[in-house]
Amino acid sequence: MSPPPLFRPITLRGITAKNRILISPMCQYSAIDGLVNDWHLVHLGKFAQGGAGIVMVEATAVTANGRITHGDVGLWHDGQVRPLERIAAFLRDNGAVPAIQLAHAGRKASMQRPWYGNAALTEDDFTRGDRPWGIVAPSPIPMDEGWLMPQELTADDLDSLLDHWKAATLRAADAGFEMLEVHCAHGYLLHSFLSPLSNRRGDGYGGDRAGRMRFPLEVIETVRAAWPETLPLAVRVSSVDGVEGGLELADTVAFAREAKARGADIIDCSSGGLLGSATAARIPRGYGFQVPFAETIRTEAEIPTIAVGLILHPDQAEKIVEQGQADLIAIGREALFDPNWALHAQLELTEGDEVFADWPKQYGWWLERREPGLRKLEGWKLPFRRA
């Protein structure tokens, strides 16, 4: 029996994921000096055990001052490689493609961890030991009133940043990751170059669309040249700013075409975040509200896409893939609610008696033997399975 579309393998360059489910990079704000720890191993490992085809490590800073908060993961020095290697190996050993997102927070760096306010650092944060640091951006425009004023990046600064992106990419490969994503969304550094609202430069890195795209495309070129040819490269975008005068979908389609020409393999289609929190898209929110962006970019830029945003139900995800609106489905906070989302989706979407065949053997062996007895109980049915 042919698997449902959501569970058909997908090949990107030399890597094949067992299904179309990708766990989004979700910042945990729990690293110390950029180092991952047991929290990250267990957090990410659950999703591999839970059946996802690709599991992506959270936004990983390419420089220390490119962190969002003091708790961000980093790859700005060699000592950060081995702890990440442990995670990549665990993901791979449990059936998932290990992926990582590289990022620089730009003018949204040096801010509070979300549970302390998700805003600019305050005296309370200083007391906890979270002191601010100098931040950078394409133009000296703070994210909002009360936020730090960023220093405008010079041409020499941009060259130095390209070196940092290259070094972080090489470290990601050394750690054993098999897919890499460049973060060009949510108001962070590369997005702030793309948007006319945050990029007011008068040199060749600002002005018209081509100028604003120049540095993000240089980063993509740099990363692609350092990343192994056999491994896929993703680019996350904010498809629209959702703010008057900001990025529109046509801008992002043009950027996706240029990213593809420089070796990007797939576009991760989010939105918003230029002002406010990372997911502050100022557009109407509903089930799969960003799926139309993924579909348009896939069609018009002729590049595979990842759909993300309030995709909660297996039937919903299945329909997106089946109708050709996107090639991968990114599950984020719904996976926090249910780390076994992929396995439960498979139960719901497939037929047959070997319902636990793809579960980790440490679980499936026991569950297969429990089920016959449960079937004898009045009113019982297998959870997540269609009646």
Image (tube, rainbow, N blue to C red):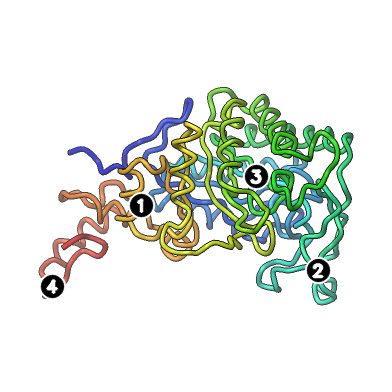
| In front of the other: 255 or 131 | 255
- Give me the C-alpha separation between circle 1 and circle 2: 39 Å
- Quadrant location of the N terminus in the rendered image: top left
Q: Quadrant of the C terminus?
A: bottom left
| Image quarter of residue 142 | bottom right
Identified by mark 2, the residue type is: Glu
Task: Residue 317: give its label.
Answer: 1
Residue 27 is at least partly visible in this image: no
- The residue tagged 2 is 145
Which numbered mark, 1 or 2, is in the foreground of this view?
2
The numbered mark, 1 or 2, whose residue comes first in the sequence reads 2
Q: In the image, what residue type sits under mark 3?
A: Cys
Marking on residue 377: 4
Residue 13 can be seen, yes or no: yes
Q: Is residue 256 above or below residue 366?
A: above
Please tell me which residue lies in front, 30 or 146. Answer: 146
Q: Position of residue 171 (x, y in %)?
A: 69, 35
Give the image location of residue 362, x and y in percent. Answer: 34, 52
Circle 4 or circle 1, nearest the eye = 1
What percent of the width, then of the height, locates residue 273? Answer: 64, 58
- How much space separates mark 2 and mark 3, taking CA atoms? 23 Å
